[in-house]
Amino acid sequence: MKLDAHCAVSKGFDVILARDCEESWTMVPTMYCLDVETWKPKLNKATNYMYISSPNADPPFRAQYYEGRAKDNKQRQPKNDKMIDETLCCMGPCWFMHKKRFFEQGGCDEGHEGGWGAQSIEVSLKAWLSGGALMVHKGCWFAHWFRKEFPWPASGRTQEKAREYSRDLWLNDKWPLATRKLQWVIDKFNPPGWKEQVVTHDAIQRNIRNDSMF
């Protein structure tokens, strides 16, 4: 299990995840924002489902909430009575999987060189592209403190370097342990903003260079 230190959790959340997580799954609890004054969850918004923005979105290829700027049906968080359900993506502060599976997926990819900002994509796509699944468990929760400032040095350049590595790895299907292509995930979930064909990382870089010329 990975859990950020600045989180509150529901009683027995770890036991529930360990009990219900299948061997081929990565599992996340329902996510809330943390009230740091009371160390309790802000119950006005529960996040069970997230998606990955398209390569042409702003920002490109990042974990996104379904309640986006455009309140249309595609961007609204799915609602159902399933206690355990599939989700395309997670934020990354808390996740669980079996130890064997963690090492089968190569652990945490050090190619990101310690840069913050891409683990949500890594955890989510390793779950799906390895032939498994990313599941949300609504029977337990964690509440994460989304800080406005970091207590350690975190430059924008370092973060972008990690995200650049992430885009190249996943958009160009370079993860050597994958048994599925990224297009399979896009076809399965049809996330907001994606077209029928995956736009490769190389195309993104051309767009970035073109934009910087004006």
Image (spheres, helix red, strand yellow):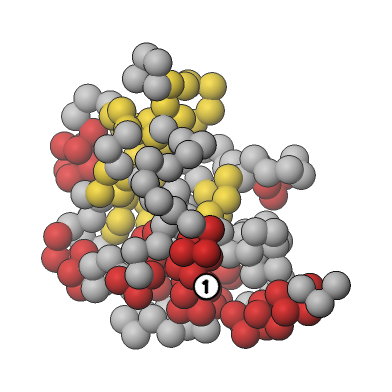
- The vertical placement of 134 against 146, above or below, is below
Q: Position of residue 91 (x, y in %)?
A: 44, 49
Pick out the residue farthest to the front.
153
The structure residue drawn at horizontal position 44% and vertical position 53%, both measured from the top left corner, is 154
Left or right, residue 66 beside residue 56: left
Drawn side of residue 197 relative to residue 186, left or right: right
Q: Which residue occupies 46% across, 30% down?
A: 33
Indicate the position of residue 95 as horizontal and vertical percent values.
30, 49
Which residue is under mark 1?
A: 164
Q: Amino acid at mark 1?
A: Glu
- Determine whether, in the image, residue 95 is placed left or right of residue 150: left
* Residue 15 sits in quarter: top left
Residue 179 visible in the shown view: no
Residue 67 in which image quadrant: top right
Residue 10's quadrant in the figure? top left
Q: Quadrant of the C terminus?
A: bottom right
Mark 1 neighbour class, 10 Å CA radius: few under 14, some 14 to 19, many 20 or more? some
The correct choice, above or below, for 27 with respect to 61 in the image is above
- Residue at point 46% right, 78% down? 169
Measuring from the top left, give residue 165's x and y in whole percent.
Answer: 47, 75
